Image (cartoon, rainbow, N blue to C red):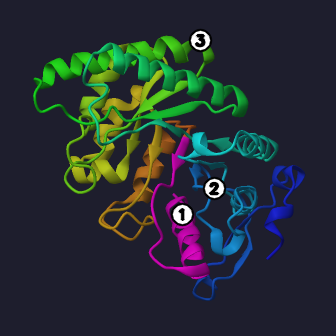
Amino acid sequence: MKNAVGASAALLAAPALAAADQTAGSRGKIRAAEKPFRMKYAPYLDMFQEHAGKDPLSNISFCADMGFRAVFDNGLPGRPVEEQNKIAALVKKLGMELGPFVLYADFAVTSFVINTPEVRQMLATKMKEGVELAKRTGAKWALVVPGHYDEKLHHDFQTANVIDNLRLCCDILEPAGLTMVIEPLNTMHDHPGLFLTGIPQAYQICRAVNRPVCKMVNDIYHQQITEGNIIPNIDAAYSEIAAFHLGDNPGRQEPGTGEINYRNIFKHIHDKGYQGVLCMEHGKSLSGKEGEVKLIEAYRYADSF
């Protein structure tokens, strides 16, 4: 295997990329591939530690060598500014896309669902922080989870408050060109008590906010648990979807380990002309280098539509 850390932009432009060696997967080996992935599947920055170590820059270079055209980092705001800048510079140099970072996702408190001066001030502060990060890194999307459901307030009042608070956020984000993606999450298995749970609900809210910088991320793992009907719901809500999160169910591992037909879903999204990122927000079914190779193999198969 060639040195992933030493990959250059010129090499990528060739494009002489690397991918999983399907004949040697059980031995954890990797060989050169013929082409990059067709879609912008985005590994998180420490997804391939067994091959690339823990350094985020080494991981980005490794991902590029493997043919991935994007990466994402939920925790980007928590990194030192110097490290953020290095990540952004390398992503740009390699011609990759940087997926959504998490700007606000406090699952334990009621926030967007209530309309108080304290909440609005907190949200305004968070949005301004997101704008500054986007200016430094060139990030295009900031992920927001509207928080916990308020058991003492009627659901419709909460919906109205979420819409108003999202509009406040848009007032700050829109001049900077930073798009907020709200994420519905499942409450049956992972996140009980959250307000935003389904694609139809998120679609309704985005349409009500009616601002170009308020969209949604469709997390296919979460929505398979919450409602299923994945492809029809993608079609129905497509105008408001700005990003996807991936993960099979059950288990939240790579495609092919559960019940979701990702090859068909990727083909459907590709045929719709989708050009955005698909964040690989899941684990690996096997440990070690073997698990990392198996993950790459899974995406090569799912991408071969």
| Residue 258 relative to residue 54: left or right | left
Q: Provide residue 23's location: percent of width, then percent of height.
A: 63, 84
Instruction: Please give left or right for residue 227 compared with residue 251 in the image.
Output: left
Circles 1 and 2: CB atoms closer than 8 Å: yes
Question: Which mark is in front, 2 or 3?
Answer: 3
Residue at position x 32%, y 42% in the image: 107
Which residue range is magenta in the image? 277-305
Q: Is residue 256 above or below residue 161?
A: below
- Looking at the picture, which amino acid does disc 1 mark? Tyr
> What residue is at 82 percent from the left and 43 percent from the top?
93
Q: Is residue 190 above or below residue 112?
A: below
- Residue 279 highlighted magenta (yes or no): yes
Disc with the residue nearer the chain's start (1 vs 2): 2
Q: CA distance from mark 1 to mark 2?
A: 8 Å
Give the x, y percent position of residue 203.
31, 27
What's the amino acid at mark 2? Phe
Location of residue 2 in the rendering, given as x and y in whole percent from the top left corner = 83, 72
Of helix, strand and loop, which one carries label 3? helix
Foreground: 305 or 231? 231
Asked if residue 215 is among those painted magenta in the image, a careful observer would answer no
Q: Is residue 208 visible?
A: no
Label 2 vs label 3: CA separation? 33 Å
Q: Which residue is mark 3?
A: 175
The numbered disc on residue 37 is 2
The amino acid beneath tag 3 is: Pro
Q: Earlier in the sequence, mark 2 or mark 3?
A: 2
The answer to whether 221 appears left or right of 66 in the picture is left
Residue indicated by mark 1: 299
Secondary element at tag 2: loop
